[in-house]
């Protein structure tokens, strides 16, 4: 078996696709009166904003947990480190709180957040099999070995034509 680099089994998500998928997440979460949205930074910021807008939730806070270290093939999860917690008065045990992230991968980050706020509801736009049990609502499942390229990870650049020159 040949090990693949992250870009070799990649799932590229455009801004438009992310917006559609985050709206789909909001649609699945509709019907409950949420007290607040908590975005897991950094990846959960954009989906949380879209979900909050769609569900007309005005109270938004963040939780910041660092887990990934390195870039590309060297990337991996390190020790979890809580860098910022949401307002403790708002959070309580998490009842009525919607925690939003872009992706659940191994589930370690959401597992830590669940320990802190056991009654919160966890929603992600994308889910991988190992982390899926940590999330109650998600939109799209991808294989564990798929690397998701989010729009904030990419930039537009010139690509030379297959034949000839410009």
Image (cartoon, rainbow, N blue to C red):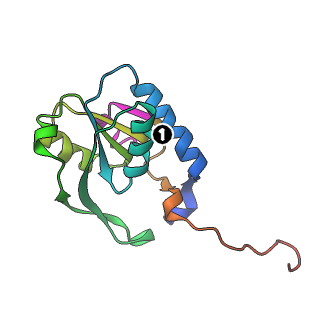
Q: Is residue 103 visible to us here? A: yes
Which residue is at 45% across, 33% downward?
54
How dense is the environment of label 1, judged by Cα within 10 Å: few (below 14), some, or many (20 and up)? many
Q: Left or right? Give the position of 113 relative to 75.
A: left
Q: Left or right? Give the position of 9 relative to 55.
A: right
**Residue 163, percent across and down?**
87, 74
> Which residue occupies the extreme front position in the image?
58
Q: Quadrant of the C terminus?
A: bottom right
**Residue 124, percent across and down?**
39, 40
In this view, the residue in front, 64 or 49, is 49
**Residue 62, percent across and down?**
26, 50
Is 133 in the magenta? yes
Is 153 in the magenta? no
**Residue 141, percent across and down?**
47, 39
Count how many numbered circles sit on residues in the image.
1
Q: Left or right? Give the position of 4 relative to 102.
A: right
Q: Is residue 161 above or below residue 122?
A: below
The residue labelled by disc 1 is 22
Residue range corresponding to the magenta coloring: 127-138
Which residue is at 25% across, 30% downward?
35
In this view, the residue in front, 77 or 125, is 125
Q: Left or right? Give the position of 91 relative to 72.
A: left
């Amino acid at each position: 078996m040949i090990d693949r680099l992250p870009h070799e089994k990649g799932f590229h998500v455009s801004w438009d696709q992310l917006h559609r998928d985050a709206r789909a997440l909001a649609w699945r979460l509709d019907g409950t009166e949420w007290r607040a949205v908590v975005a897991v930074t950094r990846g959960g910021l954009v989906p949380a904003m879209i979900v909050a807008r769609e569900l007309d939730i005005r109270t938004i806070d963040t939780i910041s947990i660092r887990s990934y270290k390195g870039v590309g093939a060297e990337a991996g999860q390190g020790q979890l480190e809580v860098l910022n917690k949401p307002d403790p008065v708002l959070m309580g045990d998490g009842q009525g709180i919607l925690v939003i992230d872009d992706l659940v991968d191994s589930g370690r980050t959401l597992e830590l957040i669940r320990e802190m706020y056991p009654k919160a509801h966890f929603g992600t736009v994308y889910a991988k099999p190992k982390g899926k049990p940590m999330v109650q609502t998600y939109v799209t499942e991808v294989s564990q070995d798929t690397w998701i390229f989010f729009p904030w990870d990419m930039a537009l650049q010139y690509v030379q034509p297959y034949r000839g020159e410009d």
